[in-house]
Image (cartoon, rainbow, N blue to C red):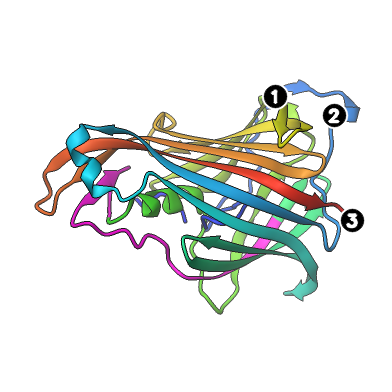
C-alpha cells in the first residue's frame, strides 16, 4: 500500500478514504489557558522553508548516485476566502510550494467546529516531484520508487486528488482535535492496508529564528500492521499562531540497482520551519 500523498501542505494534511470517527483515548486535561485552537481567520498566512537531507548513506560506494544530499523548498499557505460546497460554508486553505524548480498548488476546504478543525474536501493542482533518476530504485514500506523524494512525498501527503475536480472527504477528516489533551489519540486515516493516527504528545517550547513558541507536539503514527512504523517519524509543532515546525524522518530506505539487487541503505529527513506569519 502506498504511503500517502501532498508534500506541500505545511498546515495539516488529512486523508483520502479517511475516518473522522473520534476514536480518541482521553489523556490528562490541560489548563484552559493552554487549550488554544488553530487560527482560522481569513487572510492569515504562513511562509515556510523546507530542508530535505539524505543522511546515513551506506556503504560509501553508493554516494556516486546522489548529486546532492540537501534540497531546499519554499512555500506559502493562507486561508483565502469562504465558499459553499454542497450547501456547507467552508474556508479555502491554499498552499503554493516550490521545490527544486517544481511548483505545486493545492487547496483544502475546512470548517472550524467545537470538536476540532474539520476538512471537508480538497483539490490538488500540482506537478509531480522526484526528477532524480540515476538508474537506481528505492524500496520502502513495501513499495518501489524511482526517487528518494517520491518516498518523502508519499509519506507526507495524505491524499491524492484530481488537478481540476474537488474531491470530498467521506467522512470528513478531523485534522486538529478539541479539546487538546495530552496523550489523546484519534484516527486520521483508515483503510484496508494503512491506518494513520494522531497523538497529542505534550507541550514544548521551541525556538525558530530567535522567536520562542509554546507548542503542542503532535505525533503522526503509521500502522501498516498492528504496530506503528518505527522507521517513519512524523511530528508537528502547533501553537496558538498555527503550525511552526514539522519534522519528518524516514529511516533504513533500501537502495536498489537497475536489476533489482540491493546495493545499500539511506535515511531521509525533512525539516520545515515557518519563517514569516500573519494572523489576522
Q: Is residue 216 positioned above or below 161 on the image?
A: above
Apparent side of residue 239 relative to residue 142 in the rendered image (left or right)? right
Q: Which residue is mark 1?
A: 202
Q: Quadrant of residue 244?
A: top right
Whether residue 123 is in magenta: the answer is: yes
Which sits earlier in the primary sequence, circle 3 or circle 1? 1
Residue 241 in the image: state x and y as whole percent.
Answer: 81, 43
**213 or 174, which lies in front?**
213
Separation of disc 2 and disc 1 at Cα?
A: 11 Å
Residue 2 in the image: state x and y as whole percent.
Answer: 37, 52
Separation of disc 3 and disc 1 at Cα?
A: 27 Å
Apparent side of residue 190 relative to residue 123 in the rendered image (left or right)? left
Q: Is residue 54 positioned above or below 184 on the image?
A: below
Badge 3 marks a residue whose secondary structure is loop
Residue 138 in the image: state x and y as whole percent.
Answer: 26, 48
Neighbor class of circle 1 (other Cα within 10 Å; few <14, some 14-19, many 20+) is some
Q: Which mark is residue 34?
A: 2
Residue 157 in sight from this viewpoint:
yes
Badge 2 marks a residue whose secondary structure is helix
Neighbor class of circle 2 (other Cα within 10 Å; few <14, some 14-19, many 20+) is some
Which sits earlier in the primary sequence, circle 2 or circle 1? 2
Question: Which residue is rendered at x = 29% and y = 48% of the image?
Answer: 66
**114 or 209, which lies in front?**
209
The quadrant the C terminus occupies is: bottom right
Region rendered in magenta? 119-145
Separation of disc 3 and disc 2 at Cα?
A: 20 Å
Q: Quadrant of residue 209?
A: top right
Q: Residue furthest bottom?
A: 164
Q: Which residue is mark 3?
A: 280
Of badges 3 and 2, nearer the viewer stands 3
Amino acid at each position: 500500500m502506498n504511503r500517502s500523498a501532498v508534500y506541500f501542505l505545511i498546515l495539516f494534511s488529512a486523508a483520502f478514504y479517511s475516518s473522522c470517527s473520534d476514536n480518541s483515548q482521553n489523556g490528562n486535561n490541560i489548563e484552559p489557558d493552554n487549550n488554544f485552537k488553530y487560527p482560522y481567520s481569513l487572510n492569515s498566512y504562513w511562509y515556510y522553508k523546507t530542508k530535505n537531507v539524505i543522511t546515513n548513506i551506506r556503504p560509501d560506494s553508493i554516494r556516486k548516485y546522489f548529486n546532492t544530499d540537501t534540497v531546499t523548498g519554499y512555500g506559502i499557505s493562507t486561508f483565502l476566502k469562504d465558499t459553499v460546497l454542497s450547501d456547507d460554508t467552508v474556508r479555502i486553505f491554499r498552499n503554493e510550494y516550490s521545490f527544486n524548480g517544481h511548483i505545486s498548488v493545492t487547496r483544502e476546504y475546512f470548517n472550524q467546529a467545537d470538536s476540532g478543525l474539520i476538512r471537508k474536501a480538497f483539490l490538488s493542482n500540482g506537478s509531480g516531484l522526484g526528477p532524480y533518476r540515476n538508474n537506481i530504485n528505492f524500496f520502502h514500506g513495501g513499495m518501489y520508487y524511482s526517487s528518494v523524494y517520491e518516498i518523502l512525498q508519499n509519506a507526507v501527503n495524505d491524499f491524492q486528488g484530481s488537478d481540476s475536480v474537488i474531491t470530498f472527504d467521506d467522512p470528513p477528516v478531523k485534522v486538529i482535535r478539541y479539546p487538546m489533551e495530552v496523550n489523546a489519540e484519534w484516527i486520521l486515516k483508515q483503510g484496508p492496508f494503512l491506518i494513520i493516527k494522531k497523538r497529542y504528545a505534550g507541550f514544548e517550547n521551541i525556538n525558530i529564528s530567535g522567536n520562542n513558541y509554546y507548542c503542542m507536539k503532535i505525533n503522526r503514527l503509521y500502522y501498516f500492521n498492528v504496530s506503528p512504523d518505527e522507521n517513519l517519524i512524523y511530528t508537528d509543532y502547533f501553537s496558538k499562531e498555527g503550525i511552526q515546525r514539522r519534522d519528518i524522518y524516514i529511516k533504513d530506505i533500501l537502495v536498489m540497482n537497475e536489476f533489482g539487487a540491493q546495493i545499500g541503505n539511506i535515511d531521509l529527513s525533512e525539516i520545515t520551519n515557518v519563517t514569516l506569519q500573519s494572523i489576522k
